[in-house]
Amino acid sequence: MKLIYRLFKQDPESRESIITMTSGLGIFVNIIMALTKVFIGVLASSIAIISEGVNNAADVLSAFITLVGSKLARKHPDKKHPFGYGRIEYLVSLVISVLILVTGVEMIISSVKLIFNPEELNISYLSLFIVLGSAVIKFALGIYTMKMGKKADSNALVGVGLDSRNDSYASIITIVAALVFLIFHVSIDAYAGIIISVLILKAGLELLLDTIGDLLGRPGEHELAVEIYREVLATDGILSAADMMMHNYGPDAWSGSVNVEIDHNKSVGEIYEFLHALQLRIMHEHNVTMVFGVYAVDNDHADVKALRRTINEFVRGQEHVKSYHAVYLREEEKKIYVDFIVDYDLRDWDALRAEFLRYIGGPYPGYEIELTIETEFV
């Protein structure tokens, strides 16, 4: 493959090149296989073999759409889309999943019709050998495409590879059905077509649900978030960090925000200096545009230490409170600030708030409590 990359003047480590070359390979292989299978299926009057050929033709379209979508996703940001066009790849995955589902539905309809209106099969061991060869090719192509899709972080390419791998399984089912006919003179071709259709529908549904998850918004990549948290916490002047949000505008386009705790005695100029340097460093190292929210804290004050011990006691007794942060005590105004991070199993946030206010009201009567309850976004 490296020779082919060089022949077409493509960078084997470039995401765009990987998608382009892998999609091109899929288009070429599937065109050859579609023509071969349809020809054999017509000669043999086999709906299962014809269905496989039609599915190969659909794979050509899927690979082509993936190729075009990756090109469009690289368009430069403009006034209408200041974050770029990276999410086009998710739309491409959506289209591919729908195409797979439509193909599966059409095939299952044809197979059911064949059950009620059976046709005589005309099949040979030669045609079976050809189908077996195509199964091996499709399996290898599917595994390779999935591997390249993961390397390029392309959900659409992974979907195309998954479909190709499933096609190889479908070919095996077709071969079994044909062998049953040749040996026992019993046609189970229509039922094999139904099994193949179910496999195709399953692959299409899995890709559809995965793509819908991307469009609705998933948590930011865990490894990326951990690296950024590590970078933030290693910065002099930042005491702690929480509430990180990661927004995805395509597989390789991220922006985010995080709240950081900083000693309240730091000047605005000092805060600007190290936060600006951190922002540029994250952009350079991780290609993420990060925005910072600032919490002023005074952890060394005796009264604050006592307040934190009191909050610690409460949190230890709460099953759904994962952590707390942003503790700030305004003694003059009799005001307390604190944020709770809760898990997704907690349904009644109002009950937790009321319980904490009753608890904190004992040692701190008359204080106004500013409690923020939130889930962990990343």
Image (cartoon, helix red, strand yellow):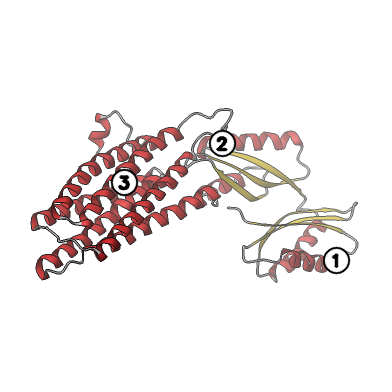
Q: Residue at x 74, y 68 (%)?
A: 314
60 left or right, relative to 89: left
Give how far across and how far down residue 186 sits, in percent: 15, 69
217 left or right, relative to 202: right
Tell which of 218 and 303 is nearer to you.
218
Local packing at callout 2 (Cα closer than 10 Å; few below 14, some 14-19, many 20+) is some
Local packing at callout 3 (Cα closer than 10 Å; few below 14, some 14-19, many 20+) is many
312 left or right, relative to 183: right
* Lower sequence index among marks 2 and 3: 3
Give how far across and how far down residue 80 sits, in percent: 58, 30
Q: What residue is shown with label 2?
A: 281
Give how far across and how far down residue 361 sits, in percent: 85, 66
Q: Amino acid at mark 2?
A: Arg
Q: What residue is shown with label 1?
A: 361
Badge nearest the viewer, 3 or 1: 3
Q: Quadrant of residue 154?
A: top left
Q: Amino acid at mark 3?
A: Ala
The secondary structure type at the circle numbered 3 is helix
Badge nearest the viewer, 2 or 1: 1
